[in-house]
Image (cartoon, helix red, strand yellow):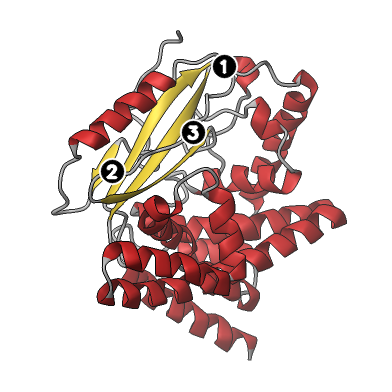
Amino acid sequence: MREFTPFMLSLSKHVPTLVRRSGSKPFSLRAATILFFLMSSSCSTVAPAGDTNRLRQTADLIEEVKAFGKTIGIEPTEALRRTSQGGPSLAMLWLWMQKEGTLALRGPVDIRLAIGLNVDKEAPKVEQVYRVDGYSVYHRQGSEFADPRSVATAGFAEEALVRRAKVILHEDLHGDVNFELAWEIEEAIVTPLGSLAVIEYLRHKGDEKNLSNALASLAEERAVSRELLALVDEAQRIFAKEKVDDAKQRILDKLANYSNYQRQFERQTREQHSPTVLEAKLSHDLAYYRYFDAIAALAEKGPSLRTLIEDLKKLPKESGHEALERYLRELDGKYGMAQK
């Protein structure tokens, strides 16, 4: 059994141990039981060592991408600086919990939880999180996050180049030297900027094949952003009129009307129970994609991605949704005038 730290109290704000929205209730006994199960199940045999050559290539890619990021205003951080060949890695299990029948429209989800797993290679996968009384629950695992203890694993080295480069830039953007904002505001800015930055990197490299893939990915993410907002608007009306269980099923049935978002929802919740995950997943996705399309549109109007990044860094630290929305409108007007 590997030594393992269940609650990483010193992690950065982007991998919080436990965050509750004001007025939310404590965990139920069933929730505590689930967390105990998750922590116990982490002491499994780890995956075999990854390909040394691929890890070495990924280490070179990381340095190259970080150096490029600096040229467009993304200060590099220590996240993903080393590979799992350099010693044990820290894997994370994230859980988001949202009160049933509600969505996090103007703030973070009700409960955000991160559990750190110290592992030699790859963390064991959690198969299922069961229903917690009164809450919808969504979970995911990963080894990439904005902290020096995040390392490039063998699994990460096997990912497509576009995703690896995007993740490197995304996690650097999370560094306080770049953005230091509330979680849901920072994710909303960093997510589109990471997707835009990888396109600039591939243009700089003259990598036409991967550039084509990155452009297609950006177009799909913009469609996801638009469809998510439309679905959330519809879901709000349904939750207001129907009993929770009936409302959940109606909203899940509506997914078929939003094909781009449906593909992402089903891919990211595979092997999770859809009615259990619904409110937490929609709320999680709002944090990442609420302003994705709007910020991508600003990048088309602005003089350069570097200018957009520099302008967004001027957003005050204490900004909420209203301040961000107002600032995005101001930038839209500013860039529109410059085009005339």
Report the residue marked by disc 3.
127
Q: Which mark is residue 132?
A: 2
8 relative to 256 in the view: left or right: left
Q: Which residue corresponds to the image point at 67% horizontal and 42% vertical from the top-left? A: 164
In the depicted view, which residue is nearer to us: 238 or 261? 238
In the rendered image, the residue lying farthest to the front is 246
Q: Which residue corresponds to the image point at 67% horizontal and 68% vertical from the top-left? A: 219
179 relative to 206 in the view: left or right: left
Q: In the picture, residue 300 is in which quadrant?
A: bottom right
In this view, 22 is above or below 334: above
Viewer can see residue 73: no
Image marks 2 and 3: residues in contact by CB distance under 8 Å: no
Quadrant occupied by the N terminus = top left
Question: Residue type at mark 2?
Answer: Val
Horizontal and vertical percent for residue 177? 45, 45
Q: In the picture, residue 113 is in which quadrant?
A: top left
Horizontal and vertical percent for residue 223? 60, 71
Q: Earlier in the sequence, mark 2 or mark 3?
A: 3
Report the residue marked by disc 1.
46
